[in-house]
Image: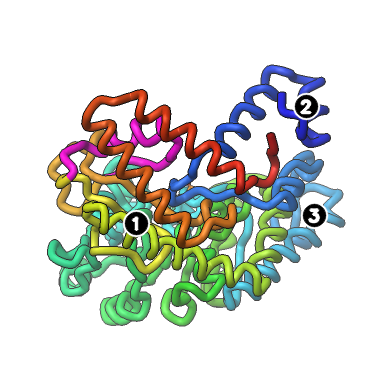
């Protein structure tokens, strides 16, 4: 057990040494490796603290002032504060902070504004969209008639001619924009123009880029998309949760869909932690952080390109980079496993027009939100690209001991950049 265990975790160690040891192991793993998973981050100690409070004890079905359980004197204030902060940070008329996570938040959007069997449209999963944008294996693909757009083969960016043609042909009720593996700026205005033309409701899923939007490092969907869905745990750097935001006229339908449509009691400890994260996101420091995420991603993209990695769309505008490993002669899965052994955590991913199977696709997806939280800057990105290149080369040559040597170097390197919630 590490010496600098927090008081909280020490108490946990007394009560349940098995789980405490595993949490400690996970802390060490998180601290000693480079986290490049594009959807992950390290939350602040304040967010961790709020998450671990007795607010978890309370049931609060309903909304402030209209609950189905008594004893809401304090919970109402917490939820209202979270809502006010969300409205201020994103400049929206309405916010609902109760969705348990991004997938239920998106499901609530369908419940609010579509009927089963209706036509909906989103980016296809292999092109960068999310499962909940109507992909076939998701409930949203099974219960709705989902049409998908993709990216252009030559540029790797959204094909707006295709979006317009599909929208005119199929007249979807909902159009989702945004996604889970999009390295370029989402052109909300272009989507809005098409949605207006076909009388569709535009839903901007900003789960990945919410922190960049909050910090002014990505254009806002406000004024273009009437409904905005986001997780709170990616670039926004809050607890695992989600929010739905909208214009005032969409508020009632959204709230009804979240509760009682889809969920029961909100997770009040998460609501409090979302409020804390939003408070952090409203500061000038967070804006600096958001811009540094993008600067780091651009630096990492350049360094990888110099080392012969092909990047989908040729680079990045945001926190995310999609690497096509085809020219490196290694699959995404073996590369991801080798990099994990070398101390670089990321995920294998399909690339647009992938010829390989989804469980061993051609790509890797990486992001810079987490390393930027640790204080790493552009110069560090050059080192990371070097280690990635060395690890991929070692993996191709089957040199496992080389991967272990890289892991040792990375562990030393990471010691300069402590993470909240754990120290050696
Ligand atoms: C764009 C997008 N929407 C929704 C989700 C779903 O979020 P969750 O995993 O919290 O259900 C994700 C998660 O990766 C995402 O990337």
Q: Quick check: is 332 in the magenta stretch?
A: yes
Q: Earlier in the sequence, mark 2 or mark 3?
A: 2
Residue 354 x, y percent position in the rendering: 17, 47
Q: Position of residue 411 (x, y in %)?
A: 53, 36
Asked if the magenta segment contains residue 401, the reply would be: no
Q: Which residue is drawn at 68% across and 17% down?
A: 18
Q: Are marks 2 and 3 in contact (CB under 8 Å)?
A: no
**Which residues, given as a range, are shown in magenta?**
328-349
Q: Which mark is residue 12?
A: 2
**How far apart, in angstroms, are the residues tagged by discs 1 and 2?**
38 Å
Secondary-structure class at tag 1: strand
Dot 3 corresponds to which residue? 75
Observer-side mark, 1 or 3, equals 1
> Percent x, y for residue 46?
74, 52
Label 3: element kind: helix
| Whether label 1 touches label 2, CB < 8 Å | no
Q: Which residue is drawn at 55% across and 38% down?
A: 412
Number of numbered labels in the structure image:
3
Q: Name the residue under label 1.
A: 321
* Front-lying residue, 274 or 416: 416
Residue 134 placement (x, y as % from top left): 31, 52
Is residue 260 in sight in this rendering?
A: yes
- Pick the quarter of the image with the N terminus: top right
Q: Residues within 10 Å of mark 1 (few under 14, many from 20)?
A: many
> Front-most of 2 and 185?
2
Kindly report the distance in space between the C-alpha atoms of the residues bearing marks 1 and 3: 40 Å
Other-residue count near label 2 (Cα within 10 Å), few / some / many at <14 / 14–19 / ≥20: some
Counting residues from the N terminus, which is met first, the one under dot 1 or under dot 3? 3
In this view of the protein, which residue sits in the foreground, 213 or 87? 213
């Amino acid at each position: 057990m590490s010496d600098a265990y927090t008081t909280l975790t020490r108490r946990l160690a007394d009560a349940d040494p098995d789980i405490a040891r595993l949490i400690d192991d996970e802390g060490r793993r998180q601290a000693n490796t480079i986290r490049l998973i594009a959807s992950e981050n390290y939350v602040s100690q304040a967010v961790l603290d709020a998450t671990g409070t007795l607010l978890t004890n309370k049931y609060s079905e309903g909304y402030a002032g209209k609950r189905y359980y008594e004893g809401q004197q304090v919970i109402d204030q917490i939820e209202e504060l979270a809502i006010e902060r969300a409205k201020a940070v994103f400049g929206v008329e309405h916010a609902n902070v109760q969705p348990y996570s991004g997938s239920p938040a998106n499901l609530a959007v369908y419940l609010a504004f579509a009927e089963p069997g209706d036509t909906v449209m989103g980016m296809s999963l292999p092109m960068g969209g999310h499962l909940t944008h109507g992909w076939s294996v998701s409930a949203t693909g099974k219960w709705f008639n989902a049409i998908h757009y993709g990216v252009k083969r030559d540029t790797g960016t959204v094909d707006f001619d295709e979006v317009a043609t599909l929208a005119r042909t199929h007249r979807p009720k909902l159009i989702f924009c945004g996604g889970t593996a999009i390295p370029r700026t989402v052109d909300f205005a272009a989507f809005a123009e098409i949605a207006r033309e076909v009388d569709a409701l535009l839903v901007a899923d900003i789960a990945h880029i919410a922190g960049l939007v909050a910090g002014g490092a990505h254009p806002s969907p406000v004024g273009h998309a009437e409904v905005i869905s986001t997780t709170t745990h990616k670039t926004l750097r809050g607890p695992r949760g989600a929010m739905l935001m909208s214009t005032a006229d969409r508020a009632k339908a959204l709230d009804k869909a979240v509760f009682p449509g889809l969920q029961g009691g909100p997770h009040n400890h998460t609501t409090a932690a979302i409020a804390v994260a939003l408070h952090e996101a409203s500061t000038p420091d967070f804006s600096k952080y958001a811009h540094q995420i993008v600067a780091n991603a651009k630096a990492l993209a350049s360094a990888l390109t110099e080392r012969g990695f092909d990047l989908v769309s040729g680079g990045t505008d945001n926190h995310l980079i999609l690497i096509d490993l085809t020219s490196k002669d290694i699959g995404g899965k073996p590369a991801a496993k080798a990099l994990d052994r070398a101390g670089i955590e990321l995920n294998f991913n399909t690339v647009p027009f992938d010829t390989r199977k989804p469980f061993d696709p051609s790509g890797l997806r990486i992001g810079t939100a987490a390393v930027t939280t640790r204080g790493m800057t552009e110069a560090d990105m050059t080192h990371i690209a070097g280690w990635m290149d060395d690890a991929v080369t070692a993996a191709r040559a089957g040199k496992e001991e080389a991967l272990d040597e890289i892991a040792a170097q990375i562990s030393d390197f990471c010691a300069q950049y402590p993470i909240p919630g754990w120290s050696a």
